[in-house]
Image: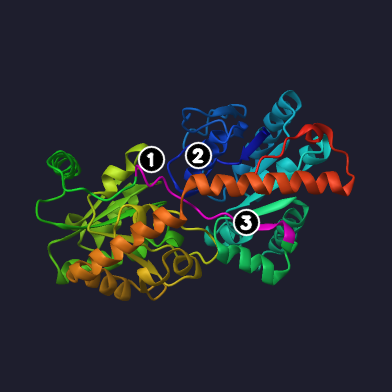
């Protein structure tokens, strides 16, 4: 059994992709018998079954801090102090860091304790900063940040990417030694996320939920879950809703997520499609399957070329046909069972959504194939066994290198 200190430089838990990965990984790793402590920011929801240690309170930050933000500069200082105190008390055998910021916090702990540092790579830190407009490529600071990101990649005892595409990018760039690079893809709980079974009880639940959301009867529904942001494709999705609603008046868009749904409601109204778009805001993860079950088609319009896209595996497990922008990550997850629109094109996105809504035979076939693939390839139990093997390899490498082992000396290998 290993004692794992997991570091999350984010407002865990806040019901979006990276947090779902942290939550599901933690549950699956603990099911294998390991002990896990999670150090994270002061705010966010407590989740059952996880020992969460939060950094010092920052009274003026109560909302979730999403993506790159200047507030992270001092939030990470607080998290670093909390992580040090937890590490000295718990003496972890593994340090598992989500994102590069967390890896920077974990690096001195690695040297202090002799415990391997595992970087859970959700995407390029500097690419995310560009996506969020936090920094520009022409900024002199950008080159230094690129250098820091490369340094953290090399210092990690193992790098786990959420997609094979991300692993290939790191491999081609020579950013991580081959024997330390592993793809552990975003997975899904296929028992909870499963297709609508047609039972009267479930149909009654669906009808009640549609009524609560104010979705008019008879509307065919396109569903989306994720962060609301331009790089996530939210703006383009609402533009596609405008195009499609003009051709298909019975189509409705359920766009779920946060932050700031109010601005996107106003944007939909400005385009004249407020009556065809529902933005309920944040959806609690434990209820997400019920909301996705309302959909006829799911959409994944993320435009980032480096980040994972974990929502797609949830869509697939629900048996929904999926329309996505043409990106390497989308292709990796969906393969030949997705419908792809030209990256950034609202017109093509509307066209592919219309195809999925109109050709119900094709949609049913793609949905069934997606469900089968999710069950076969995207199980969190399977992912946890991969992670366990990565831990064991990293521990064995440190012992073989003859480095100071500290708490890592007494590990028990479980494969």
Outermost residue, left direction?
A: 217
Q: Badge 2: few (under 14), some or many (20 or more) residues near its Cα, within 10 Å?
A: some
* Structure colour scheme: rainbow
Residue 220 located left or right of residue 316:
left
- Asked if the residues shown at circle 1 and circle 2 are in contact, with their CB atoms under 8 angstroms apart, the answer is yes
Local secondary structure at mark 3: helix
Q: Badge 1: few (under 14), some or many (20 or more) residues near its Cα, within 10 Å?
A: some
Residue 236, position in %: x, y? 35, 66
Whether the magenta-drawn stretch holds residue 136 is answered as no
Of mark 2 and mark 3, the one earlier in the sequence is 2
Is residue 243 visible in this depiction of the protein? no
Q: Quadrant of the N terminus?
A: top right
The residue depicted at 36 percent of the width and 47 percent of the height is: 257
Residue 366 located left or right of residue 133:
left
Dot label at residue 285? 1
Examine the residues drawn in magenta and state their main secondary structure. loop
Of mark 1 and mark 3, the one earlier in the sequence is 3
Residue 259, position in %: x, y? 41, 46
Is residue 340 visible in this depiction of the protein? yes
Local secondary structure at mark 2: helix
Whether the magenta-drawn stretch holds residue 183 is answered as yes
Residue 340 located left or right of residue 71:
left
**Residue annotated with mark 3:** 125
Region rendered in magenta: 179-192
Q: Quadrant of the C terminus?
A: top right
């Amino acid at each position: 059994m290993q004692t794992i200190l997991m570091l999350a430089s984010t407002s865990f838990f806040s019901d979006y992709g990276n947090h779902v990965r942290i939550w599901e990984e933690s549950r699956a790793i603990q099911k294998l018998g390991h002990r896990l402590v999670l150090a994270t920011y002061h705010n966010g929801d407590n989740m059952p079954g996880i020992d969460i240690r939060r950094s010092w309170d920052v009274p003026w930050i109560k909302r979730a801090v999403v993506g790159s933000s200047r507030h992270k500069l001092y939030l990470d200082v607080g998290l670093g102090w909390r992580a040090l105190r937890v590490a000295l008390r718990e003496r972890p055998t593994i340090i598992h860091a989500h994102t590069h910021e967390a890896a920077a916090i974990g690096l001195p702990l690695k040297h202090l304790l002799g415990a391997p540092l595992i970087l859970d790579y959700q995407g390029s830190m500097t690419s995310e900063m560009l996506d969020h407009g936090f920094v520009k490529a022409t900024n002199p600071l950008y080159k230094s940040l690129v250098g820091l990101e490369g340094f953290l990649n090399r210092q990690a005892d193992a790098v786990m990417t959420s997609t094979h595409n991300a692993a290939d990018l790191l491999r081609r760039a020579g950013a991580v030694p081959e024997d330390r690079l592993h793809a552990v893809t975003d997975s899904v709980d296929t028992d909870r996320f499963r297709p609508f079974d047609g039972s009267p009880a479930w149909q009654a639940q669906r009808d009640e939920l549609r009524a609560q959301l104010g979705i008019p009867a008879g509307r065919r529904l396109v569903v989306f879950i994720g962060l609301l942001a331009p790089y996530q494709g939210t703006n383009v999705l609402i533009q596609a809703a405008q195009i499609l609603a003009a051709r298909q008046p019975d189509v409705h868009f359920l766009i779920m997520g946060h932050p700031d749904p109010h601005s996107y409601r106003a944007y939909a109204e400005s385009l004249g499609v407020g009556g065809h778009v529902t933005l309920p805001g944040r959806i609690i993860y434990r209820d997400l399957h019920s909301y996705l079950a309302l959909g006829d088609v799911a959409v994944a319009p993320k435009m980032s070329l480096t980040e994972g896209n974990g929502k797609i595996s949830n869509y697939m497990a629900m048996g929904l046909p999926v329309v996505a922008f043409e990106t390497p990550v989308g292709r990796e997850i969906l393969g030949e069972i997705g419908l792809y629109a030209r990256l950034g094109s609202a017109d093509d996105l509307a066209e592919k959504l219309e195809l999925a809504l109109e050709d119900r035979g094709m949609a049913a076939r793609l949905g069934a194939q997606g469900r089968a693939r999710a069950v076969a390839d995207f199980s969190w139990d399977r992912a946890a066994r991969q992670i366990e093997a990565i831990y064991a390899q990293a521990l064995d490498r440190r012992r073989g290198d003859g480095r100071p082992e500290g708490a890592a000396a007494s590990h028990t290998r479980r494969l």
